[in-house]
Amino acid sequence: MLLETILAVFLAVGIAHCQTPPGFEPSTSHKLGVKFSKKVAVHLGNKLDKDDTQTIPHLKVKSLTDDAKNAYCLQTTIFSSHYMVFMIDLDVPQNDTTVPFLHWYQPDLNLDPKSGRLFLPKSSHLSNAEYYPPSPPPGPPHRYVELLFGQPPHYKLPSQFEKYLDKKSSARAGFDMKEFIKAANLKRPIAGNWFLVQKVEDENEEL
């Protein structure tokens, strides 16, 4: 009985510290601050209204910068001087199954070490996948995960993933995060977060 209690406590702590959906890999214990507006913030699978997620969110890594030691690490060789973010829908229906859908990919982000704010410098020339707002079909809620990675030096988008830069919905389906990590030689994500969006049956149908 005591052993079961101890295991349950460890499991609960692990779940509480994970900033990505249960069972999803790659996972991370650091929170990526994601805000669509002053009143709309992402927090560990909370449900958001689709209309509140139509613009690119603001990003912070406050969980890292709150600690002086971690803030120092962000400016040293442990992490990159540039970062990239992904936003992926894990639950897009396709041929009687579900596939991941790339909603956003932005490389070349810079970090303000004082505020933890991530921003895109004007000098960036790397291609990105433009933000594609959530618009799930009627049915169960979709999980949207955001992942922040350190960007390797001399980074170049792997050629096999160039097709996902197209904003057409048909081009974004089937994005494989694990394969991208291998192809781009990325480390584990620095921070993450996720939220839910659900479309109810009486809403107007959208593509």
Image: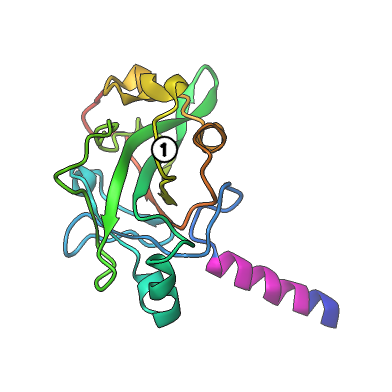
Does the magenta segment cover residue 195? Answer: no
Provide the residue span drawn in magenta: 6-17
**Viewer-closest of 178 and 73:** 73
Above or below residue 15? Residue 121 is above
Q: Secondary structure at mark 1?
A: strand
Quarter of the image for residue 13 reads bottom right
- Measured as percent of width and height from the top left, residue 61 is found at 35, 65
- Measured as percent of width and height from the top left, residue 17 is found at 54, 68
- Measured as percent of width and height from the top left, residue 205 is found at 24, 25
**Viewer-closest of 26 and 83:** 83
- Identify the residue shown where x is 14% and y is 45%: 122
Does the magenta segment cover residue 16? Answer: yes
- Identify the residue shown where x is 23% and y is 46%: 53
Q: Residue beneath label 1, please?
A: 89
* Residue type at tag 1: Asp
Quarter of the image for residue 108 reads top left
Res. 1 visible in picture = no
Above or below residue 165? Residue 30 is below
- Identify the residue shown where x is 44% and y is 59%: 79
- Identify the residue shown where x is 49% and y is 62%: 78
Please state if 40 lies on the left or on the right of 95 as rendered. left
Quarter of the image for residue 14 reads bottom right
Image label count: 1
Q: Main secondary structure of the magenta part?
A: helix
Q: Characterize the local packing of mark 1: few (<14), some (14-19) or many (20 or more) Cα atoms within 10 angstroms.
A: many
